[in-house]
Amino acid sequence: MVISPLTLNLDTVHLTDEQFYQLCQNNSELKFERTATGELIIMPPVGGESGNRETDLIADLVFWNRQTGLGYTFSSSTIFKLPNGADRSPDAAWIRRERWAALTTEQKRRFPPIAPDFVIELRSATDDLKKLRQKMLEYLDAGVQLGWLINPQQQQVEIYRQSQEVEVRNLPTELSGENILPGFSLSLSCYGQ
């Protein structure tokens, strides 16, 4: 049985940022996101295959970042407060060192009010592709410079860049961090099997 994300329309209930933060803290066993319009999304846990793939992606990003020291990496447990009011948690994210340093200690401790420079979304069996694509465009609108939507179900990856058309590649493929993550490359050879 596949469990899809549950979206609650809170038209008559408007959670403040503090209330949303407390909801997340008081229900740490659940993973929440909130859309710019205030809808609350309760994300189901991923299965073993998606969890393993997500961990591999984060490990590659962390390894590159430790070598370069250019910024900070974040897991899917991190919620970012985007400029449009949405609270989103990509599967992996990275922020340049100087942008992260500009935040206060309190902002870093809670849900950072910043759009990452780079995000990865890995489509799991429970993810609706249309909603993931909308989320990727939301990231770009928020200021994300580069994003990868990895879609093992259709054996594709979509590359999102500022002011450019979405590039679609078939798997397996090799991805470049381009000028956003200089020297970073990610081989998606295992996804083509």
Image (tube, rainbow, N blue to C red):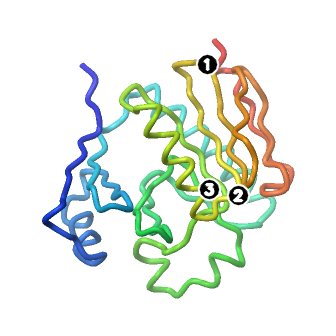
* Circle 3: residue type: Leu
Residue at numbered disc 1: 155
Q: Is residue 58 left or right of residue 105?
A: right
Residue at numbered disc 3: 140
Q: Looking at the image, tell me whether mark 1 or mark 2 is earlier in sequence order.
A: 2
Horizontal and vertical percent position of residue 141: 59, 60
* Circle 2: residue type: Gln
Indicate the secondary structure of the residue bearing disc 3.
Answer: helix
> From mark 3 to mark 2, how far is it between C-alphas?
7 Å
Image: 165 above or below 144: above
Indicate the secondary structure of the residue bearing disc 1.
Answer: loop
Q: Closer to us: mark 3 or mark 2?
A: 3
Horizontal and vertical percent position of residue 32: 31, 54
Residue 181 found in image quarter:
bottom right
Q: Nearer the viewer, residue 143 or 89?
A: 143
Q: Looking at the image, tell me whether mark 3 or mark 2 is earlier in sequence order.
A: 3
Indicate the secondary structure of the residue bearing disc 2.
Answer: loop
Extreme top residue here?
Answer: 193
Image: 168 above or below 79: above
Q: Residue drawn 25% across and 51% down?
A: 30
Q: Number of labelled discs?
A: 3
Residue at numbered disc 2: 145
Q: Residue drawn 73% across and 26% down?
A: 169
